[in-house]
């Protein structure tokens, strides 16, 4: 149903936007406070905008012994932010025809075939169930984090031993590191190469992420001078966490990156929006990247993270594929994920509608800087630094809007001849439309001027007419017919106090 329930999208600009340079002190203060409050040795944070790392700053130290300062080249484990790389690898294998998301996981991990499910009518786990954490496996933070070092052969034995299910698969969302470790095994078995090699070949190398990788003992890629060592805060002091080598759970949380490298990943993901006709040069198709934002219907209502959360609109949060996805009334589509790991905490949030991303990496156990990251996004919005791409006015909408204006001026539906869908006059007769147009004209008079259209797609638009004694708001919705026809038109007098 098409309804006029509120004001049209704002057309006028507020105060002139700030620059990112002007906003930098506010961003720095957010992260400085978080670093101090959470006892974090070192942190690096960045804003990706216009396809590049537009702002980055490292504060604190990589290690408490030598006190090497954190820079944009410092290397951090990103923990569960690795899951997005795993999810995109699965989707790329789907694109290559090497698997289907609805395939049973046991087809690629045969040790799962002997699992005993909780009920006789339980569905067997599909690949997509693992991607979106609906496989019925128990939430396994922090146990899963410590499995990073598990050898592949030991993982094979673990899988073969079976698992105790938390619930019936496909019945609810429950976050599972074990599930993403299984996805890493699926990547390896479907591609015919180790998981890490496939990610390197498909994502890291094509994006030029030369400092990123899973083997933290590789001193050529990850020299000690650039490595942020991990710590936990215990008994009012920092204690070193053990360095966890690459193992079977790497696909759930093992990737190590620099801020400069990670910004390339964020910029690549953001470049998938909006859909367009440009050449699609990869390394993964734009449409495939956009699939990451498709959440299942196991949603939860949450507050926005950060200082503005209590007063902001509630968010309906779902898990996509390696991302938590929500629609924010100020920020638009948001895709976010934290990373918590022995020695490290991280957070990333994308705003694809605006082509902007914020991320932060730290070297203290579970100190995921989600609050300052989201507060930075809100600050960017308030500073006017989150431009929204304009939805173009389609030729069909332009034509039908012109007909709607002509019908209002004429006081009847004659200008709509040949332009109405079959339902239009069944929903309201021509005579009643003439009466309605007369009533509106008596209220606001002739409407010689129109403000720019605010299309909500190629087949619908909101509009405003500036009239002799008021304003007229409208919505126009076209039908899925060829040629295009009008299925609905709504008109109302705008309240006097509405801008």
Image (cartoon, rainbow, N blue to C red):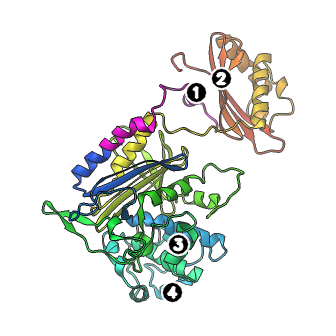
Q: Position of residue 446 (x, y in %)?
A: 71, 12
Residue 271, x across and y down, in percent: 59, 52
Highlighted range, magenta:
1-29
CA separation, marks 1 and 4?
A: 58 Å
Which callout, 3 or 4, points at the residue further toward the start of the chain? 4
Magenta: main secondary structure equals: loop
Residue hosting label 4:
113
Q: Is residue 282 left or right of residue 319?
A: right
Alpha carbon of mark 3 to alpha carbon of mark 2: how far?
A: 51 Å
Mark earlier in primary sequence (1, 4):
1
* Residue identified by numbered label 1: 11
CA distance for labels 3 and 1: 45 Å
Disc marking residue 200: 3
Q: Earlier in the sequence, mark 2 or mark 1?
A: 1
Q: Which is more foreground, mark 3 or mark 4?
A: 3
Q: Secondary structure at mark 2?
A: loop
Label 3 to label 4: alpha-carbon separation: 30 Å
Secondary structure of residue under mark 4: helix
Mark before the other along the chain sequence, 3 or 2: 3
Mark 3 neighbour density, 10 Å: few (under 14) some (14–19) many (20 or more) = some
User: Which residue is labeled 2 in the image?
Assistant: 451
Q: Position of residue 186 (x, y in %)?
A: 53, 79
User: Does residue 365 appear left or right of residue 487 in this picture?
Assistant: left
* Element assignment for label 3: helix
Q: Residue at x 32, y 55 (%)?
A: 43
């Amino acid at each position: 149903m098409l309804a006029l329930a509120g004001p049209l999208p704002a057309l006028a600009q507020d105060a002139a936007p700030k620059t990112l340079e002007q906003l930098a002190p506010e961003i720095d203060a957010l992260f400085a406070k978080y670093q101090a409050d959470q006892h974090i040795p070192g942190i690096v944070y960045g804003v990706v905008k216009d396809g590049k790392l537009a702002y980055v700053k490292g504060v604190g130290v990589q290690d408490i012994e030598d006190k090497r300062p954190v820079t944009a080249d410092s290397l951090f484990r990103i923990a569960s932010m690795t899951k997005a790389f795993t999810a995109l690898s699965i989707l790329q294998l789907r694109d290559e025809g090497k698997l289907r998301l609805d395939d049973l996981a046991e087809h690629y991990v045969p040790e799962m075939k002997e699992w005993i499910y909780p009920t006789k009518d339980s569905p067997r786990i599909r690949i997509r169930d693992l991607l979106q954490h609906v496989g019925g496996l128990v939430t396994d933070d922090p146990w899963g984090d410590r499995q990073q070092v598990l050898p592949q052969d030991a993982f094979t034995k673990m899988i073969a031993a079976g698992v105790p299910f938390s619930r019936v698969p496909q019945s609810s969302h429950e976050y599972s590191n074990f599930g993403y470790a299984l996805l890493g095994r699926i990547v390896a078995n479907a591609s015919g190469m180790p998981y890490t090699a496939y990610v390197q070949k498909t994502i890291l190398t094509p994006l030029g992420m030369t400092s990123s990788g899973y083997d933290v003992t590789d001193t050529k890629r990850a020299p000690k001078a650039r490595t942020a060592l991990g710590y936990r805060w215990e008994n009012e002091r920092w204690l070193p966490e053990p360095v966890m080598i690459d193992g079977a759970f790497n696909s759930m949380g093992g990737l190590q990156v620099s801020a400069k490298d990670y910004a390339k990943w964020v910029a690549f993901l953001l470049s998938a929006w909006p859909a367009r006709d440009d050449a699609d040069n990869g390394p993964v198709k734009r449409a495939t990247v956009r699939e990451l934002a498709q959440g299942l219907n196991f949603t939860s209502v949450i507050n926005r993270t950060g200082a503005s959360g209590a007063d902001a609109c509630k968010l309906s949060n779902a898990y996509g594929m390696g991302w938590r996805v929500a629609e924010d009334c100020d920020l638009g589509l948001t895709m976010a994920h934290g990373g918590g790991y022995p020695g490290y905490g991280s957070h990333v949030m994308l705003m694809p509608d605006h082509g902007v991303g914020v991320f932060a990496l730290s070297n203290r156990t579970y100190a995921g800087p989600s609050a300052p990251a989201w507060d930075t996004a809100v600050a960017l919005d308030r500073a006017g630094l989150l431009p929204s791409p304009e939805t173009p006015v389609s030729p069909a909408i332009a034509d039908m809007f012109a007909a709607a204006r002509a019908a209002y001026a004429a006081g009847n539906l004659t200008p709509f001849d040949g332009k109405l869908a079959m339902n239009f006059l069944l929903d309201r007769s021509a005579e009643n439309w003439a009466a309605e147009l007369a009533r509106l004209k008596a209220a606001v008079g002739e409407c010689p001027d129109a403000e720019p259209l605010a299309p909500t797609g190629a087949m619908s638009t909101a509009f405003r007419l500036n009239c002799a004694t008021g304003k007229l708001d409208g919505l126009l919705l076209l039908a899925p017919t060829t040629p295009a026809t009008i299925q609905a038109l709504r008109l109302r007098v705008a309240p006097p106090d509405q801008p």
